Amino acid sequence: MSYRELQVASPDGRVIEVATVGDPAGLTVFYHHGTPGSAPLVKMFARESDQTGLFFVTMSRAGYGLSSRREGRSIGSIVDDVRTVLDALGRDTYVAVGWSGGGPHALACAALDAPRCLAAWSLAGVVPIDVDFDWTEGMGPENLEEFALSKIGGPDYERHIAQEGEKFAHANADNIIELFGGLLSDVDKAALAEVEARTVLAEACCHAFVASYTGFFDDDRAFFAPWGFAPSAITVPVNVWYGDHDLMVPPTHGAWLAKSIPTAKVTHKPQEGHISLATEHMDELVASFAKAFRT
């Protein structure tokens, strides 16, 4: 596995933690991790990068892992950091892929960085908060508690996020399923049956909080503020993937995105959940990345 870690300086003096996997001679896929998460999760594409020749690039979003905080960041502001990372690596055109909390950030690239961003994938991604939509319907209990507190804000909310960060800072392959609690459906638990899958996920969750909980806190704040773009204004192809057994981001989110993005191509997997949506269809998913460069 050709996994590499490095740090890139942003124009405003921040540090951006970057990881890559695959052959640098290949075409560029920029991966946006979930919430919480960090750069090491790109290892999930290691086998497919070797098979397809694609070059996967990711970063720990500001405040996660070793990346400096960018307080007050929006979903749309991610594009500045994506450009900085790709320029530092000498990369040109790319496709953007976001899983869960990374989904809106991939959509930001499609909306604000075309034509450099050729296409985007939202894998179990959430919808904007400022639309007529029941954001939490169908979510598991942990999300319901978190988002109820987030609407109120203040010390209780920040204390909750800090406690969650402390919990996930000790994630490992043995406890990761327990840490997610009621957010994992049965199909998602089955998708994490192999220790390798649990190890990669746990490493990314643990590393997310190596410095602080601010990445998690700022992700939440960005979800519950204007994104800086309208999904309806996207003009490049967007691939919306979602499953019906998802307790983190219920299928209503995927259905809304599919209806609201004019360029959307929908991959609806009724039998899948939040984790299994990608892990059980990795070959199909990565093949669709490669196809985007040929159209």
Image (cartoon, rainbow, N blue to C red):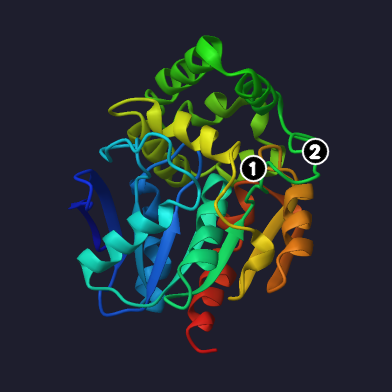
Q: Which mark is residue 134?
A: 2
> Looking at the image, which is closer to me, 228 or 101?
228
Left or right of 144, for residue 270: right
Evaluate whether residue 280 shows in this view: no
Q: Is residue 282 above or below residue 5?
A: below
**Residue name at image x 56 percent, y 24 percent:** 178
Q: Of the residues shown, which amino acid type is indicated by label 1?
A: Asp
Left or right of 167, for residue 266: right
Q: Of the residues shown, which amino acid type is indicated by label 2?
A: Asp
Element type at mark 1: helix
**Residue name at image x 60 percent, y 36 percent:** 224
Mark 2 is surrounded, within 10 Å at the Cα level, by few (under 14), some (14 to 19) or many (20 or more) other residues, namely few
Q: Position of residue 220 (x, y in %)?
A: 54, 33
Q: Position of residue 75 (x, y in %)?
A: 50, 48
Q: Is residue 266 above or below residue 59?
A: below
> Looking at the image, which is closer to me, 191 or 130?
130
Residue 143 found in image quarter: top right
Q: Which mark is residue 188?
A: 1
Residue 192 found in image quarter: top right
**Residue name at image x 22 percent, y 73 percent:** 90
Evaluate whether residue 110 shows in this view: yes
Q: Decide: marks 1, 2 in contact (CB < 8 A)?
A: no
Left or right of 70, for residue 10: left
Q: Position of residue 295 (x, y in %)?
A: 55, 89
Residue 257 found in image quarter: bottom right
Element type at mark 2: loop
> Looking at the image, which is closer to me, 164 or 89?
89
Q: Which mark is residue 21?
A: none
